[in-house]
């Protein structure tokens, strides 16, 4: 089987600045326990030439393979993920004069952007000889892991909060993965998963606790860049934030594009969180060096119910490195944004994916976004597993 041309070089811990071997199984930094990130040999890669080659390849995220970690085509496990639509939305109430577009990852295999991270992480796990994987998840990551593990013939177990939407639990089981239900949020699911799995020798695919999901999520940034064209890049990207990997991934994509001489100034990244669970936005507002856990987290958006994200320094750094910021929205505004996106634009989006639309008037109000600017709202998942009417009742 052919070489992918991956330029993977090493893993690096940005907390203690040590590097480690990228060609063996790795989880967190062996020295300090923080997240590890993949570095690539970019010095001798001609950016323009690379981009030309990329645009001639099939429309999946594997077109960026030189900057992805999988070394051999044999291990690429694909369901055709990536290159999702970027749709203009026209005039949006509360954001008159702003050119608003929406990137729709609701059309991804398994219904969410989580397929990006899992396609890459499962492929790389298989390449490194792993056979047995697990993940704590709010739903979408578990569904994605189950699907890609099935396609790669690997075993998977998914730890889900009890209150995860039933269609997601059923999907995980349908793909042949095991579901373990846990009381509480993804934090409790993670604690139980790590305790239970310790004896098994299985591999933890929790977000940022292994180095390659973020590489898959990085392709969100590459696609935004490629689909907008370097002259029409959005000024700002508004992103629904839970574990924060999407923000970290996009900031990493922009840093790599900059290193290749393809991007001068990255879009500003704005984290959107529900006002019942907004630890990242709070830390951004306070100028804090890290996120402190959110007490009594509550929201209707399961993927945003992350009271204490791992390696939060990296999330804050991602936002700050682009001169972006954070904003909260109410659950009621999320529900109303779901309705608006469906009725005005024909888009059925998840509560998480509706949060950026809900945040838009507030961003304009606070002058974080101005008329004349281009703003991209990131829809991270499909609305199909959700009952809008039930959500509307729950927020009154
Ligand atoms: C649909 C959806 N949007 C957003 C998120 C949060 O993503 P991130 O970890 O990149 O902050 C999740 C996580 O579960 C999700 O399922
Ligand atoms: Zn370290």
Image (cartoon, helix red, strand yellow):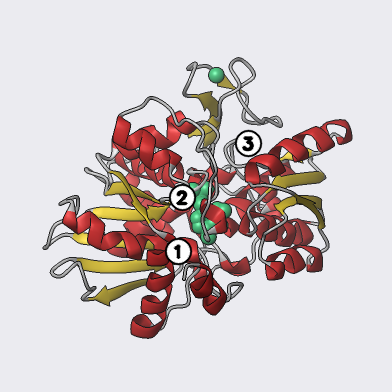
Q: Which residue is mark 2?
A: 276
Residue 172 lies, in percent from the top left, at 75, 62
Q: Can you tell which mark lies on residue 266?
A: none
Question: In the rendered structure, which disc, 2 or 3, sits on the residue that comes first in sequence?
Answer: 3
Q: Which residue is farthest right?
A: 199
Q: Distance of mark 2 from mark 3, alpha carbons?
A: 28 Å
Q: Distance of mark 2 from mark 1, alpha carbons?
A: 17 Å
Residue shown at the point (77%, 45%) measured from the top left: 133
Q: Are marks 3 and 1 in contact (CB under 8 Å)?
A: no
Q: Nearer the viewer, mark 3 or mark 1?
A: 1
Residue 150 lies, in percent from the top left, at 78, 61
Where disc 2 sits, the SS reads loop
Disc 2 within 8 angstroms of ligand 1 (CB): no
Question: In the rendered structure, which disc, 3 or 1, sits on the residue that comes first in sequence?
Answer: 3
Q: Can you tell which mark lies on residue 353?
A: 1
Disc 1 within 8 angstroms of ligand 1 (CB): yes
Q: Quadrant of residue 129?
A: top right
Residue 71 lies, in percent from the top left, at 63, 43
Is 139 displayed left or right of 244 in the figure? right
- Badge 3, how many Cα within 10 Å: few under 14, some, many 20+? many
Q: Which residue is mark 3?
A: 210
Q: Nearer the viewer, residue 65 or 147?
A: 147
Where disc 3 sits, the SS reads loop
Total marks in image = 3
Is 41 displayed left or right of 362 in the figure? right
Where disc 1 sits, the SS reads helix
Q: Distance of mark 3 from mark 1, alpha carbons?
A: 25 Å
Residue shown at the point (38%, 84%) measured from the top left: 343
Q: Nearer the viewer, residue 138 or 307?
A: 307
Residue shown at the point (63%, 24%) measured from the top left: 21
- Badge 1, how many Cα within 10 Å: few under 14, some, many 20+? many
């Amino acid at each position: 089987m052919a070489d992918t041309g991956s330029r993977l070089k090493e893993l690096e811990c940005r907390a203690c600045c040590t590097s480690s071997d990228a060609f063996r199984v790795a989880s967190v930094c062996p020295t300090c326990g923080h997240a590890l990130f993949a570095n690539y040999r970019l010095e001798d890669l001609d950016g323009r030439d690379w981009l030309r080659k990329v645009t001639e390849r099939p429309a999946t995220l594997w077109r960026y393979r030189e900057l992805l970690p999988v070394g051999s085509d044999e291990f690429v496990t694909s369901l055709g993920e990536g290159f999702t639509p970027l749709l203009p939305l026209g005039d949006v109430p509360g954001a008159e004069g702003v050119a608003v577009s929406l990137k729709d990852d609701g059309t991804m295999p398994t219904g969410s952007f989580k397929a990006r991270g899992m396609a890459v992480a499962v492929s790389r796990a298989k390449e490194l000889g792993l056979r047995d994987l697990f993940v704590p998840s709010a739903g979408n990551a578990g569904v994605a892991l189950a699907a890609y593990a099935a396609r790669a013939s690997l075993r998977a177990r998914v730890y889900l909060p009890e209150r995860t939407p039933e269609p997601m639990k059923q999907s995980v089981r349908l793909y042949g993965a095991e579901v373990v239900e846990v009381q509480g949020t993804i934090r409790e699911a993670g604690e139980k998963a790590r305790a239970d799995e310790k004896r098994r020798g299985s591999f933890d695919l929790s977000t940022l606790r292994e180095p390659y999901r973020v590489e898959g999520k990085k392709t969100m940034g590459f696609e935004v860049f490629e689909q907008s064209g370097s002259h029409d890049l959005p000024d700002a990207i508004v992103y629904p934030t839970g574990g924060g990997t999407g923000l970290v991934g996009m900031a990493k994509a922009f840093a790599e594009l900059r290193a290749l001489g393809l991007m001068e100034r990255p879009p500003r990244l704005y984290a959107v969180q529900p006002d019942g669970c907004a630890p990242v936005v709070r830390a951004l507002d306070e100028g804090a060096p890290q996120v402190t856990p959110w007490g009594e987290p509550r929201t209707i958006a399961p993927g945003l119910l992350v009271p204490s994200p791992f390696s939060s320094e990296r999330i804050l750094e991602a936002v700050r490195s682009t001169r972006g910021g954070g904003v909260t929205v109410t659950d009621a505004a999320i529900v109303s944004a779901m309705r608006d996106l469906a009725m005005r634009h024909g888009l059925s989006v998840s509560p998480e994916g509706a949060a950026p639309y809900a945040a838009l008037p507030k961003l304009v109000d606070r002058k974080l976004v101005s008329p004349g600017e281009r703003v991209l709202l990131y829809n991270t998942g499909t609305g199909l597993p959700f009952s809008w009417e039930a959500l509307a009742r729950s927020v009154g």
